[in-house]
Image (cartoon, rainbow, N blue to C red):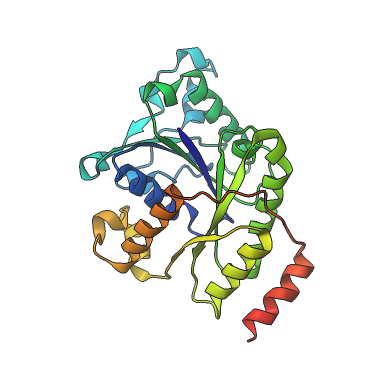
Amino acid sequence: MRQLAIYGKGGIGKSMVSSHISFGIADRGLKVMHVGCDPKHDSTRLLLRGKMPKTVLDTLRRKNFDVKSITRDEIVFASPLNTECQGKIYCAESGGPDPGLGCGGKGVIEAIETLQHLNVYKELELDAVLYDVLGDVVCGGFSMPIRQGYAEEIYIVSSGEIEVLFAASNICKAVSRFAGRSGARLGGIIGNLRELKNEEEILGTFAEMMGTQVVGFIPYSEKIKECSGKGMTLYQLAPDSKECDAFRTLTENIWNNKMFTIPKSINFEELYTWWRTIVQK
């Protein structure tokens, strides 16, 4: 079973990208579980036709954190899109505290440990697990898939914007820090384009600086925004579009990827100096 984690700065479109990758893996005739690791619990929305499922953390609260009283069907949900692909998609959301209360990473820790306790991955005979993980890995909970070895392959969604690249560099630092302990490796950068000048060159060069590769580019598109607004993936709304083809190519590249590295990182001052030279060309 392959275990992948998709990281990236908040707001970069990581959950949209992750949902399309999960569908693409399932469309290869495989069984995949998509685990949303974000307190907003909206990662699986496109895979559940716009619905927001009950979260692992909320279920644990109702059961006074007695994991032995929880059943798989309370926290794992089969995607209604299973009738539209060759394989199977299962969804789970970690959840988190109410805004302003508690630690956001706690839900990630509780969710993964609960799924492990219930032996979900083995019982469902999964081919892949995909973790969609929030943010810049400043919290131990969000770094758990890397730190504890739950995710063996890490991919980072990034645009060519300086703040997003710096977040990507920080994620690379986390992968490097825990690589010896967990065995996690970086599989590459996913370019989610924002129509920035020289953006593909920026991302390609950045990947080389980090000691990795770009595994695919997703074009900036109003069609993608429309899909998100309707709670659908491109596979349902626009299967013949160039945008959907980009996701097919991305999924193919990820599934066939053989290049996994312990990445480098860079401080903000060095990154910004380099970034300005390309943007100003």
User: Which residue does the image show at 77% across and 62% down from the upper left?
Assistant: 267
- Please give left or right for residue 133 compared with residue 231 in the image: right
Judged from this view, the residue extending furthest toward the top is: 68
User: Which residue does the image show at 39% across and 22% down from the upper left?
Assistant: 72
* Front residue of 159 and 44: 159
How far across and down, in percent of the image, does residue 269 sit?
A: 79, 69
Vertical arrangement, residue 237 with respect to residue 46, above or below: below
How far across and down, in percent of the image, does residue 84 sit?
A: 22, 45
Residue 233 figure quarter: bottom left
How far across and down, in percent of the image, does residue 50 sit?
A: 32, 48
Judged from this view, the residue extending furthest toward the left is: 83
Residue 219 figure quarter: bottom left
- How many marks the image carries: the answer is 0
Judged from this view, the residue extending furthest toward the front is: 258
Asked if one can make out residue 229 in the rendered structure from this viewpoint, the answer is yes
Asked if one can make out residue 166 in the rendered structure from this viewpoint, the answer is no
Residue 92 figure quarter: top left
Quarter of the N terminus within the rendering: top left
Vertical arrangement, residue 36 with respect to residue 121, above or below: below
User: Which residue does the image show at 49% across and 76% down from the upper left?
Assistant: 195
How far across and down, in percent of the image, does residue 224 sit?
A: 36, 63
Vertical arrangement, residue 58 with respect to residue 199, above or below: above
Quarter of the C terminus within the rendering: bottom right
User: Which residue does the image show at 49% across and 54% down from the upper left?
Assistant: 14
- Please give left or right for residue 3 compared with residue 230 in the image: right
* Front residue of 87 and 72: 87
